[in-house]
Image (spheres, helix red, strand yellow):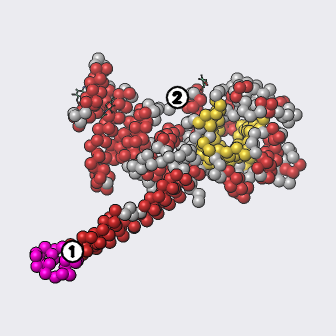
Amino acid sequence: MQFKINLIFVINYLLLFVCGGVHNVFAGNTEFFSSVHQMSKLVQLESVLLQQMQKYIKINENKLDFLKDRLAMLERDNREALEEGLNYFDSPLNKYYLTKRLTVDWARIENIMQHESGKKTLNRIAKYESTNHYPENSELDGAIAGFLRIQEVYRLKTADMAQGILDGVKYNISLDARLCLDIAKYAAKENNMRFTHSWALEALKRLQDPAEVSNNPTAVLAEKLEVAEILELLATSKKNLGDLKGANQTYAELVQLRPDIENYTREYLVFLKENVHKEYVSVDLSDEHEPLPADLHSTDQFTRYKHTCNGLLKQSPSEERELRCGYLTETDPFLLLAPLKAEELNHHPLLVLYHDVLSDAEIEIMKGLSDNRIVRATVAGINGSVVSELRTSQFVFMPRTAHKLLEAIDVRAEQMTDLNMEYSEDHQFQNYGIGGHYGQHYDWFQSEDLLISSREMGNRIATVLFYLTDVEQGGGTAFPFLKRLLMPKKGDAAFWYNLHADGVGDLRNLHGGCPIIVGSKWVLNRWIRENIQSDRRPCELWPDSCRDCA
Ligand SMILES: *[C@@H]1O[C@H](CO)[C@@H](O)[C@H](O)[C@H]1NC(C)=O
Ligand SMILES: *[C@@H]1O[C@H](CO)[C@@H](O)[C@H](O)[C@H]1NC(C)=O
Ligand SMILES: *[C@@H]1O[C@H](CO)[C@@H](O)[C@H](O)[C@H]1NC(C)=O
Ligand SMILES: *[C@@H]1O[C@H](CO)[C@@H](O)[C@H](O)[C@H]1NC(C)=O
């Protein structure tokens, strides 16, 4: 079963687990939000649970139907006895019946009432819960984080996202007030006041929308509480964003709505005290995004990465003029028969995209190999590898000896790079999930201490990144300094050098996987090491004047 729609998953997942109130049921340690592939398994698990629930209801319905029948009969007999008074006992048969009703019959009924119907299904559910991995509550935060990352990077409007419009494509799903509020709360926790404001506003709009209220009458009861929660978030975010006039108004509304809650009064008083000598100006907060910097080129790394992902930062036609496409035939005699389709994306440093280097059949084999083995990706740090919000994906390493196809892939990578593949790391397969991304980074190790696996292999001289899937929306590979965005296309592969010819890390090759909006992204990473490449990479072909660029 192939589930593609990533963000739709997020939303359903959030609706199911946040709003369905299914808290604390889950235990286990597989993480779902970082892989679409893992989440598709959850859908199957859910359907098993629902089948068990249906059985449980059926069994209990049968039991209650039986009891109702019995009750009607017993009531009839009892009424008769009451009406007839002592005459009832004229018949010895009736004496017998009454006694029987209160002994044998009643014991049986009591027995049935006490019987825990559906115990078997409950046991079965408990067994599923213990033998399958369930998402944990903490994963909800991961899901919301991914959702907001998508919004931030692609500069999506809150109102659009809440209606299921993602980067211009309308999906048949919309977010309710509760979920908008949860997103606002998360944004507040992360100190992202613009998103806090816009999502709280969206929640409020939904609560006040008569259509939503009549659709969901049970929500009305909870509404009073939520409105206050929303107003508090609005007031806090307005205050933080400098909209003192708006904050003053919202605090006043909040205190008027809930004069009984001391916290709100106290917060308002603190606000008034803090701003006693200030003029209450009004700030337009209708844009949930920071204004764009005047010059995107002179921003920090993360800002450049974001705007490479969303396409605002790209090469100009004059920068692209020298770049060529063509067939590569030189690196191996075999290529005369089957040349590689190469597209240059940048010269200094070299970045090449090879088209159609993997067949669909090969990709199916690779997915089969890595299926069920992926775990949450880590980021290399001084103290070893750590799970990080920087990298939300799942991966598995596989030695090339695991399958003859992997050896064949390496032959192809050797033709593409003209580098010796003998000293390369194991094949790394990776699947990205909800808002899945790998923030901007270098593939080369920054210090000797970080050289992972055998040090004698040297640093990562080059990378070949194979795309094993298309991605419907988002999920490109961004090179912020080269101003290049590579959109994943199934079967393609990108190649670039990580090091200058003399072995120093190249700062211009900063890159990152952009958040996925819709789709599931599988990639294969081949990291090639420096050892014994000296005859393969003649420096003079790549004049290297840009040591300190970027
Ligand atoms: C949208 O979803 C609703 C309920 O989930 C369904 O009844 C309706 O047919 C769907 N519309 C489209 C266009 O898919
Ligand atoms: C703050 O709000 C209150 C209540 O609406 C209002 O009476 C007061 O004038 C406002 N203060 C300022 C400085 O605008
Ligand atoms: C009031 O504030 C305290 C501490 O700041 C907090 O623990 C408590 O949950 C708050 N109560 C409400 C109703 O917000
Ligand atoms: C690494 O571990 C040491 C000792 O446990 C600690 O002092 C240091 O802060 C850690 N560094 C990082 C980056 O986590």
Residue 294, numbered circle: 2
Quadrant location of the N terminus? bottom right
Q: Is residue 404 above or below residue 103?
A: above
Choose between 173 and 14: the one closer to the eye. Answer: 14
Residue pictured at 51% horizontal, 49% vertical: 134
Choose between 542 and 521: the one closer to the eye. Answer: 521
Q: Is residue 314 above or below residue 46?
A: above
Q: Secondary structure at mark 2?
A: loop
Report the magenta stretch's main SS. Answer: helix
* 283 is within the stretch colored magenta: no
* 94 is within the stretch colored magenta: yes
* Of the image marks 1 and 2, the number of the one nearer the N terminus: 1
Residue 336 located left or right of residue 483: right
Q: Position of residue 449 (x, y in %)?
A: 71, 26
Q: Position of residue 410 (x, y in %)?
A: 79, 46
Callouts 1 and 2 close, C-beta under 8 Å? no
Q: Is mark 1 within 8 Å of ligand 1?
A: no
Residue pictured at 22% horizontal, 34% vertical: 260
Is the residue marked by circle 1 packed among few (<14), some (14-19), or many (20+) residues within 10 Å?
Answer: some
Residue 470 located left or right of residue 152: right
Separation (CA) of disc 1 from disc 2 = 93 Å
Amino acid under disc 2? Ala
The number of callouts visible is: 2
> Which segment is the magenta one?
78-97
Q: Secondary structure at mark 1?
A: helix
Residue pictured at 58% horizontal, 41% vertical: 392
Kindly tell me whether residue 288 is visible in this rendering: no
Q: Position of residue 315 (x, y in %)?
A: 64, 37
Amino acid under disc 1? Leu
Q: Which residue is mark 1?
A: 98
Choose between 219 and 55: the one closer to the eye. Answer: 55
Kindly tell me whether residue 96 is visible in this rendering: yes
